[in-house]
Image (cartoon, rainbow, N blue to C red):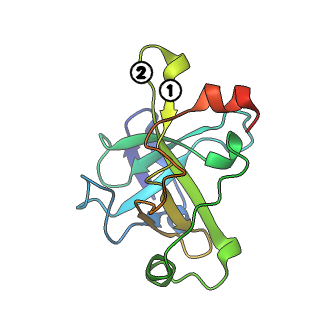
Amino acid sequence: MIINTKHFGYVKIPREEIITLPRGLFAFEDIKEYVILGRKNSDNPFMWFQAVQNPDVCFVVIDPLTFRKDYSPPIDQTVLETLEVEDEADIRFLAIVVIPDDTAKMAANLKAPIVINAKKNIAMQVILDTDEYKIKHYILEEIQKGA
């Protein structure tokens, strides 16, 4: 399948790499299919979460474990059921990143991660019911802390 992307032009992707979000992302509820671009065989921790049908909808994302080794948020049972999770080892997280002009202040939203059943490529964005994680976790600050 060939998709039009915001940053890479036309890209060929295997259908099995499409991630379905039955409820979409917050504020993008109508967009249900995304693909992850970047990171394969790369030291760059950032990836693109690209909408399949709309080249203009694309988010910079990061696996929170790359800068926050203890990231292990509690996931509600209803979320696990919605994502058809049979084994919690199949769960992956992505955090949406905001990169301001001052890149030292780039931040990841660990409070509302994208939770992915990597085995079935079904995902949803959730708001965690915990005060441990915030909407803005400053990535470079977390790396310097050695978290």
Q: Position of residue 6 (x, y in %)?
A: 37, 36
The amino acid type of the residue labelled 2 equals Pro
Judging depth in this view, the residue of 144 and 65 nearest the camera is 144
> Is 82 situated above or below 142?
below
Q: Which residue is mark 1?
A: 106
Mark 2 and mark 1: span between their CA atoms?
Answer: 6 Å
Q: Which residue is mark 2?
A: 100
The amino acid type of the residue labelled 1 equals Met
Residue lying furthest front in this view?
Answer: 131
Q: Is residue 43 left or right of residue 47?
A: right
Q: Is residue 38 left or right of residue 123?
A: right
Q: At 48% from the left edge and 53% from the top edge, which residue is drawn?
A: 131
Q: Position of residue 81 (x, y in %)?
A: 48, 84
Within 10 Å of disc 1 (Cα), the crowding (few <14, some 14-19, many 20+) is some
SS under mark 1: loop
Going from N to C along the chain, the mark reached first, 2 or 1, is: 2
Q: At 28% from the left edge and 59% from the top edge, which residue is drawn?
A: 31
Q: Position of residue 87 (x, y in %)?
A: 67, 81
> Is 52 situated above or below 146?
below
> Is 73 situated above or below 22?
above
Q: At 33% from the left edge and 57% from the top edge, which residue is drawn?
A: 25
